[in-house]
Image: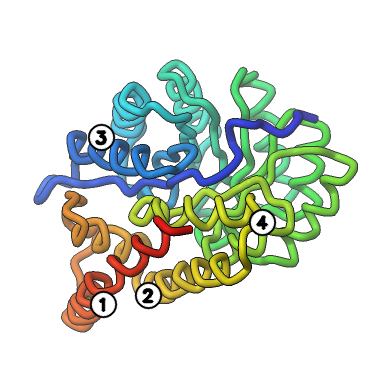
Amino acid sequence: MVAPVASLEGVHAALVTPFREGSGETDLAAALELVDFAAGRGVDGIVLLGTTGEFVHLGIKARLHLAQFAIKRSRLPVTVNVSHSTLEGALELARGAISAGASALLLMPPYFYPYDQVQVEAFYVRFVRELRPGVPLLLYNIPLVSTPLDFATAMRLIAAEGYAGIKDSSGDILNFRRMLAVRKHTPFTLLAGSDAIYAEARAEGGDGVVSGVAGALPELLSALDRSIRSGGPDGARMRLSARLLEFVAWCDGFPPPLAIKAALAVRGLKTGPPAVPLAAEAQERLARFCEWFSGWLPLVLKESEGA
């Protein structure tokens, strides 16, 4: 069992990955601007190449290249997702990320093909025993895109195999509460990976959030986190939480991370084209979102500054 990691507390912005028009390659200069943008607006850490970062569109070399330069650029701790469809791919990514200076690693179950929990657990056990990472290693539960990581499996891996904790992106607050209950006798790092349940999860004792929304709205997530931690007025906390849920509701109407990239573009940051061309109806909805966001943003920034 590994004790909770202080550097993983608070708001960690899960950054999008900007792509160059017509090539599918990473726009490294734009990616570094996103690191600066989030780091300068109150978040506690940066997360690279997660689901919001569309890592599945990049090969191992491209992922490590981005991680190397972003870690060098960031003045905050950087966590790198090293998930891969194979064990060897995940190990290569992990070794490269550690060599580049990653503060922590995220690892989801091998994706695309379904695996039972026995196989998932065997994968995690083999990974940590071969890697012996030397940095905190977090389980990454995201049933939307990979085999779900069952509660019992996760707790065994944390208790016996040296995993420092878990980023739970299931969005299931009841599952999060089950893990909170275990922490009363088995301390570990517990991060929400779903913005929709973050305010509730943090108020009930979670360590923090890995937030895609924080990549576009770091001010809002940072202000909400400060409000929860300080035990400030309920009204301010509820108002900020409601703002977060308004944004999440728009995001849910698009494939991730389309709305987050569109919001960043409204804020003057480059994110490049979507990985998949948009149908006409989606383009119209995205235009409506950008119009709404342009009017909504100044109000949220003002409320966040005053929190």
Q: Is residue 279 visible?
A: no
N-term-proximal mark, 3 vs 4: 3
Mark 1 touching mark 2, by CB under 8 A?
yes
In the image, taking residue 23 as reference, residue 172 lies left or right, namely right
The type of residue carrying mark 2 is Trp
Question: Which residue lies at the image location 57% right of the left edge and 56% below the top edge?
Answer: 227
Mark 2: secondary structure: helix
Location of mark 3 (residue): 32
| Disc number for residue 250 | 2
* C-alpha span from label 3 to label 2: 26 Å
Badge 4 density bin: few <14, some 14–19, many ≥20, Cα 10 Å: few
Give coordinates of residue 7: x percent, y percent. Answer: 58, 31
| Disc number for residue 231 | 4
The type of residue carrying mark 3 is Leu
Question: Which residue lies at the image location 45% right of the left edge and 28% below the top edge?
Answer: 93
Give whichever of 302, 131 is nearer the camera: 302
Q: Which of marks 2 and 4 is in front?
A: 4
Badge 1 density bin: few <14, some 14–19, many ≥20, Cα 10 Å: few
Location of mark 1 (residue): 292
Total marks drawn?
4
Q: Which of marks 3 and 1 is in front?
A: 1
The type of residue carrying mark 4 is Gly
N-term-proximal mark, 2 vs 4: 4
Mark 4: secondary structure: loop
Can you say which quadrant of the picture contains the N terminus? top right
Q: In which quarter of the image is residue 8?
A: top right
Give coordinates of residue 219: x percent, y percent. Answer: 39, 53
* C-alpha span from label 2 to label 4: 28 Å
Mark 1: secondary structure: helix
Mark 3: secondary structure: helix
N-term-proximal mark, 4 vs 1: 4
